[in-house]
Image (tube, rainbow, N blue to C red):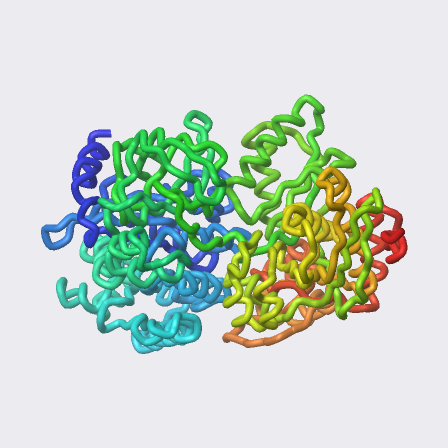
Amino acid sequence: MGKIEEIIKRMKDVMYVTDQIRNIGIVAHIDHGKTTLTDNLVAASGLLSEDLAGKQLVMDFYEMERERGITIFSANISILYDWKDKDYIINIIDTPGHVDFADEVIRAMRAVDGVILVVDAVEGVMPQTETVLRMALSERVKPVLFINKVDRLINELQVTPQQMQERFMEIIREVNDLIRKFAPEEFKNKWQVSVNDGSVAFGSAYHNWALSVPYSQETGVTFKDVYEYLQRDRQKELAKKIKLYDVVLRMVIQHLPSPVEAQKYRIPYLWKGDINSEVGQQMLNVDKNGKLVMVITDVSVDPHAGDVSTGRIYSGTLRRGMDVKLINAKRDARIQQISLYMGPHRVVVDEVPAGNIAAVVGIKDVYAGETIAEEEIPPFESFATKLEPVVTVAIEAKNPKDITKLSEVLRRIAKETPSVRVEINKETGEHLVSGMGELQLEVIVHRVEHDNKIPVNVSPPTVVYRESVKKVSPIVEGKSPNHHNKFYIHVEPLEPSVLEALMEGKIPEGKYKPRQYEKEYVEAGMNPDDAKNVWAAYNHNVFVDRTKGVQYLNEAKELIIQAFQEAMDDGPLAREKVMGVKVVLDDAVLHEDAVHRGPAQVIPAVKRAIYAAMLQAEPFLYEPKQYVFIYAPQDYMGAINKELQSRRAQILDIQSEGERLVIKAKAPVKEMIGFAAAIRSATQGRAFWTYEPAGFEPLPKDLQDEVVRQIRTRKGESPEPPKPEDFLE
């Protein structure tokens, strides 16, 4: 532990020198070498022997990650690197490459200012490379490029030096095209990567060597020398001359921004409060003497310490014992313990100033995405809305005595992973767990059974649908059970551009103060009269008040919004969530005595009116789709094609790269369940495939009745959907 103590002592000094801090993520397509690269960087701090770097995979401390050879959770580590007689703190987050864990990537991007994009020299830019780079750029995070596995080009593909350079140029060109495509306007050219300035490096993370143009000029080791060392298989000698961590960490220090630089352009984008306010200016300037503002990007549960919340400090100094506010949860808390990450170790410290990433122990029930501050401020933009869980399994404890424990474990997993939803089916008592895909749910089941020793029964996966409407309904009268209150409601399809703005988080969801987001709704394409009367947005639906001078309406407002939310959680057609509907209150008659317009009267009246209106507005189902990318030898084209066509997939693009095919298709998530086993069998295990969410699209009309009946039967409802009159007296 002596080594760690010495490093901590030096780190304590450097963490106050904000321009000597770099917060970075490592992102890539699955299996391109992110975790192996991170090992090498850990070796720079002396926490891992250089011989083991790349083999130890210190960041994969969840054993299923080692078994499968993939990274499932983002892992944090802080290292110290001495360059030109200055110590630099590099806070690193290693992220997953598999799309099922994309929410981990998005959350990591909130905490960092720069990323190292890792690309396999042989495979080149792959679909997930594009996805993770797009996520980074959407959070205003600057990239540099590391081309990995260069030894494979020579050892496996036997390329000439000329072909090798051409391959590098092709990868760099593709990455720059993506930066031009996805970067914010002001950074499209500024953030281009280049060999000449050293924002591109290449090497082998497994064999611990790397080279960049500036490092070549410094050491005298040339591109030609590298080629000769590789041809003679003398990579160990090469690794002693051109250490990977020296090349990559210098690239990070020179080309990725410090918090001082990054927060000036990131804060106005990530935080919608007043930038000219005192706290706004403190965050822009990374003021360690200002008021504390911290965003939690990751929550894990330590069996000994309880909830451990990791996050980025944007202003102020986080101190042990300080009282803070959880802005989204609307409650107060006390900071009991603060620590820094050293890979699997957490090292306790007394305080951490702005610009750093730190872990907090002792705040109960905190969720990723929470804004922690010393005083009331607007929260940071949410990132949980960007990914929708689309596959659900029912999990049931085999032994009744484990039911409570199972509830606790699943609640904890949902807290750690915002893209996972856990609900209890009130009729059956089963836990319904929804996630991004089959693999994510497999990991959850593994954690329940293996880590927590709870044997469970798991249902086959089912897919999450969404209900919506195609046309404007007539106005429906909803009466309260006591007949003293009447609500006149109609529904209509939400403007597509408004739906998109809600889905992308450009307009926050929730209950609104009068005219709170009027400007945003008008800009998104809503008519101005509706925009100033939006009461709430929920699940990508909005509630609009078009009434004039209704008495007591304000007193019933909360209950009306609650009824709207309940209806949007549980649509009339198939008891699925509703999406893309505008619910309009046209008029109301309310009893003068508050006793006669309580929850038991208002909520059923409003809900039933919404349901009856939806059923008269051509209700339909949206189904979730995903893009599928398949890589396989040319000979299997026929087998793959047949497999895709049997799953209602639409083939969008086929490219051949030498002997290999790359097929891009779009398919319904439901039809892709079980695809992994089928494609392995059809291609004798020679195909590799990935996918990413493609949003929701209307279910073909000829399938709707059958799917609605299946869903209703599964949920214990009568197979035929209700009629409007079933909700009207």
Please state the horizontal and vertical placement of residue 113, each as a whole percent of the image.
32, 57
Please state the horizontal and vertical placement of residue 658, each as a whole percent of the image.
50, 75
In depth, the one of 610 and 234 nearer the eye is 610
Vertical relation: 274 (above or below) 70 = below
Q: Is residue 238 visible?
A: no
Vertical relation: 392 (above or below) 659 = above
Q: Residue at x 48, y 53 (%)?
A: 382
Would residue 637 appear left or right of 728 to someone viewing this image? left
Quarter that holds the N terminus: top left
In depth, the one of 590 and 663 nearer the eye is 590
Q: Is residue 177 visible?
A: yes
The residue lying furthest to the left in this view is 85
The residue lying furthest to the top in this view is 401
Vertical relation: 74 (above or below) 476 = above
Would residue 66 appear left or right of 461 to someone viewing this image? left
Q: Quadrant of residue 197?
A: bottom left
Q: Residue at x 80, y 45 (%)?
A: 715
Vertical relation: 466 (above or below) 336 = below
Please state the horizontal and vertical placement of residue 305, each as a whole percent of the image.
41, 27
Please state the horizontal and vertical placement of residue 260, each as a whole percent of the image.
24, 56
Q: Residue at x 85, y 52 (%)?
A: 727
**Label total for image:** 0
Would residue 565 appear left or right of 241 to someone viewing this image? right
